[in-house]
Amino acid sequence: MDNILAANTKAPLFGMQVAVAHFKTRTPPSGRVVNISSFLGRVPAAPFRSIYSAAKAALNSLTSNVRMDFAAAGLSGIHAITIMPGVVHTPFSTNALHSSGPLSSSVPGQSVEEAVTPIVEAIEAQQPPSEVYTQGERQHAAAVKYVEDVGAFEQGFMKTYRTS
């Protein structure tokens, strides 16, 4: 548990502290903080990932609060972006602790290239977005549905999970 929190919440915090200190030395202060979170940090839709999801939710909250801190301090040239990829098909799942092997090709996801494109677009944007779902509208719609009625979302998800 400590390793998951250290890698997914504490390390980005320490990275932000170093980066923002550097961004503040620019005239005018400017830069992009880009935190790679996970869709699971917004919508806990994967069983047995509670600590990971919680760590990513903490990163989402931290990034949102840092954005508010920048605004309150008048640092309009420094932006904090939360990136929320869904499933990205890489060999990671094969090598992960307690892995059951590679993800099935039936698991909906995206290639690395598909995931990277919206990240690059967010970084290069004149007015960067606060949050980016790398799978676009599909993820955004699921997040909205989750927030509207957490209980109904979880019941529907568990019915689907148990039958698959």
Image (tube, rainbow, N blue to C red):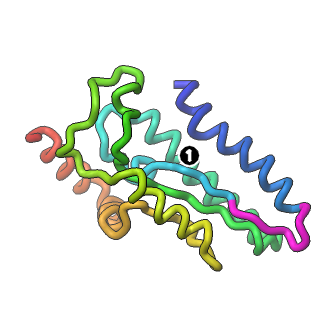
Single out the residue that lies furthest toward the left: 163
Q: Is residue 153 above or below residue 29?
A: above
Which of the 4 quarters of the picture holds residue 145?
Answer: bottom left
Q: In this view, does 78 lie above or below 43?
A: below
Q: Overall secondary structure of the magenta stretch? A: loop
Q: Residue furthest front?
A: 113
Q: How crowded is mark 1: few (under 14 residues within 10 Å), some or many (20 or more)?
A: some
Quarter of the image for residue 149 reads bottom left
Residue depicted at 47% across the width and 65% down the height = 118
Toward the viewer: 92 or 36?
Answer: 92
82 w.r.t. 98: above or below:
below
Q: Which amino acid does label 1 sit on?
A: Ala
Please tell me which residue is depicted at 74% across the width and 63% down the height of the picture.
Answer: 69
Count of residue discs:
1
* Percent coordinates x, y for residue 106 in the rendering: 17, 45
Say if the magenta span includes residue 140.
Answer: no
Name which residue lies at 45% across and 33% down: 51
Q: In what quadrant of the picture does the C terminus appear?
A: top left
Relative placement, left or right, of 53 versus 122 is left
Frontmost residue, 9 versus 86: 86
Residue 60 point in image, percent of width and height: 55, 53
Q: Residue 81's spot in the image, x, y percent?
A: 60, 62
Q: Which residue is drawn at 52% across and 61% down?
A: 119
Residue pointed to by mark 1: 58
Residue 123: image location, x then y, percent: 61, 66
Is 117 situated left or right of 73 in this image? left
**Secondary structure beneath disc 1?**
helix
Q: Does the magenta stretch include residue 31?
A: yes
In the displayed structure image, the side of residue 82 where residue 112 appears, left or right: left
Q: In this view, does 118 lie above or below 38?
A: below
What is the span of residues highlighted in magenta in the rendered image? 25-32
